[in-house]
Image (tube, helix red, strand yellow):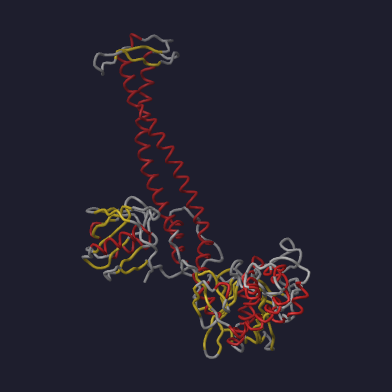
Amino acid sequence: MPIDGLTLGLMAGELNRTLADGRISKIIQPERDEIILTIRSGGVNRQLLLSATANCARAHLTTTRKNNPLEPPALCMLMRKHITGGRVCAIRQIESDRILEIEIEHYDELGDRASKRLICEFMGKHSNLIFVGSDGRIIDSARRVNEQISSVREVLPGLRYELPPAHGKIPFDHVEADALYAALAGRSGPLHKLIAQSISGMSTQTARELAFRASGSEDAHSDEIDLRAACESVARSLRAIPENLAPAILYNDDGAPVDVVAFPYLSRAHLRAEAFPTLSEAMDAFYRTRDMAERIQQKSAALHRTLKKNIERCERKLALQQEALLGSQRMEEYRLKGELLTANLHLAQKGERSVEVPNYYEEGMPMLKVELDEKLSPGQNAQKYFKLYQKARNAQTLAAEQIEKTSAELNYLEGQMDNLGKCEEESELFELRQELERFGYVKPNRSRRQMKQLPPSKPMRFTAPSGQAILVGKNNLQNDKLTGTAQPNEVWLHAKDMPGSHVIIVGENPDEETILYAARLAALYSKGRTSSRVPVDYTLRRYVKKPGGAKPGFVIYTNQRTLYVQPAEEPTTV
C-alpha cells in the first residue's frame, strides 16, 4: 500500500535513530522520481531510498543496487553540489502528515555553515521530492508544478516552499478520546470512514483496523455501536502502537505479498505474516520485486506498442500477399485460353464478346467459352491472355517469396514480444531494445536519461529432480550465447514451430525424467505456455546450426525428437 502518515511517522523515528549525524557521501537519481542518498552513520554506509512514484511513494533504507544515468538530472547535480559531505541533522515528520523532512547541515562555497532541507511529500499522484534552501526557497524538485498543473500551490525553483493545505484533522499522535468523540458526534456512516476523515495519517486499511479493534467489525456503522467507547478504543490503540511495533509482510493464500505493516493487524490475522527486524527491511523486501516489475512494465510499454504495431503490419501484409497468391492460381486458365484461341483464330471475329473453341486438352474435345475484348482482334485477344498468364506467373513467384519473407519477420517479432514478457531486469530490457534498434524497429535512444552500460543479463537456471542444471534463455542474445557455448553432446530443447526460449540441459546423458522436466520448462517459456499440450523438440547441441546472416535467436536443427508436454508451473530459479 502507499505509505500513510502513521507508518511514515514510525519510519521517520526509525530513520532518525539510524541516520542522525551521518554524513552524505553519495547521491544518485536512478529515476526521475527517485533519489538514493548514501549516508555513512555509525561506521556503516547505508542507502536511503526516497521515492515519489505515484502508487508506491515511500522512504526507507535499501540494499537494492540501482543503475545511474550517464548524465545526472538537474536535481541530482544540484544536491551533489550543495550537500555532498553534509551532515544529517534530523529526519522528522511534518505535522503528522505524509511529509518527511530531512535537515542537512553543510558548508557553503564561502566556508560558512549552512543548512538545506529535502522535503519528501508522499501523496499519491501528487508525490514530490523538493530540495529547499536555508532561506526557505525551492532550489529544485523532482516534479515542477506550475499554475497550469495546480492552482492551489506551485512548486518551482525560486518560490518559497509552502506546506500543502491543511485539512484540520486531529494528529494521529495526539488523539484524545473526548476530542475524537466531539469530531464524530452527530455524524453518521461507516466507522472506518469517519476515522479516516477525522484523524490525520490514516490510510483506509489502517482506519479499518482501528474500527475492527473498536467494534469487532471493519464495516461497523456509527449508528450501531457505542460511539464513545469506540473513540476510547481508537485513542488507546493509537497510543499503544509505538510500543507494539512488529514490521511484517502479509501474504495471501496464493503466497503473493499483499501489504507491508508496522504493527499487527488483528483484522488480517488470517493472512500469513513474515516478520522483519525493522520497518525499513520489511518495506525494502516488499517493494523490491514489485517496484522493479512496475518499472519494467513502464519502460517496456513503448516497446510493446512498437512490436504490436509491427506485428499487425506484418499480419495485414501477409493477408494481402496470400490473397495475391490465390489470384495467381488462374494463370493456367489464362495460358489454356491463349493457346486455344491462337489455334482457332478463324473461329473468332473482331467485335465479338466471346467465342467457343474446342478444348484439345480434354477427352472428347468439349467446347470452351473464351471471353474476348470486342475492341481487339482475335490475335490481340490471344496475346492479352498470354500477358495475363505471364503476369500471374510472376505474381505467384513474387508472392511466394514475399510470403516467406513476411512470415519470417512475423515469427521474429512474435518471438520478441514473447521475450519482452520475460524481462525482469533492466539489462534484459536494454538488450532487447538494442536488438530492435539494430534492425530499425526502434529509433536509437538519444535521451539524456540514458543509463550507464548495464552488465550482461544471464539466463535462468533451474535444477532438475536428478540434480542436473537446466539453463533457459530469456531473450535472443541469451539464446545465442546459451546455444553457442553449450557442449556438443548436451541436450538442446525448443518449443516446436513457435517462439520460445532455447533450453540446455547441462551435462551429458540426462535421464528421461530430466528431459521431460526440461521440456516442460521449454513449453512454459514459449508462446504456447497457456496450452495444455505443447510440442517440444529436443536434440543434441551438435545438430543445432545457426545459418549465416540469420537474425538473433534463429537456428535450424536435425535429428530431433518431439515430446508433447504440459507447461511446467512457475518454478523457482536458482
Q: Is residue 199 left or right of residue 330?
A: right
The quadrant of the rendering that contains the N terminus is bottom right
x and y percentages locating residue 275 in the rendered image: 50, 79
Comparing 350 with 2, the one in front is 2
Residue 540 appears in the figure = yes
Q: Residue 358 appears in which quarter of the rendering?
A: top left
Q: Is residue 228 left or right of residue 447?
A: right
**Rendered view: 563 above or below 92:** above
Number of numbered callouts drawn: 0
The quadrant of the rendering that contains the C terminus is bottom left
Comparing 241 with 385, the one in front is 241
Comparing 424 with 556, the one in front is 424
Q: Is residue 248 left or right of residue 104?
A: left
Q: Residue 520 appears in which quarter of the rendering?
A: bottom left
Comparing 183 with 42, the one in front is 183
At x 37%, y 24%, the residue is 387
At x 55%, y 71%, the residue is 259
**Rendered view: 307 above or below 236:** above
x and y percentages locating residue 434 in the rendered image: 45, 60
Residue 67 appears in the figure = no
x and y percentages locating residue 542 in the rendered image: 23, 59
x and y percentages locating residue 76 in the rendered image: 60, 74
At x 46%, y 41%, the residue is 316
Q: Is residue 426 left or right of residue 186?
A: left
**Rendered view: 413 above or below 335:** below
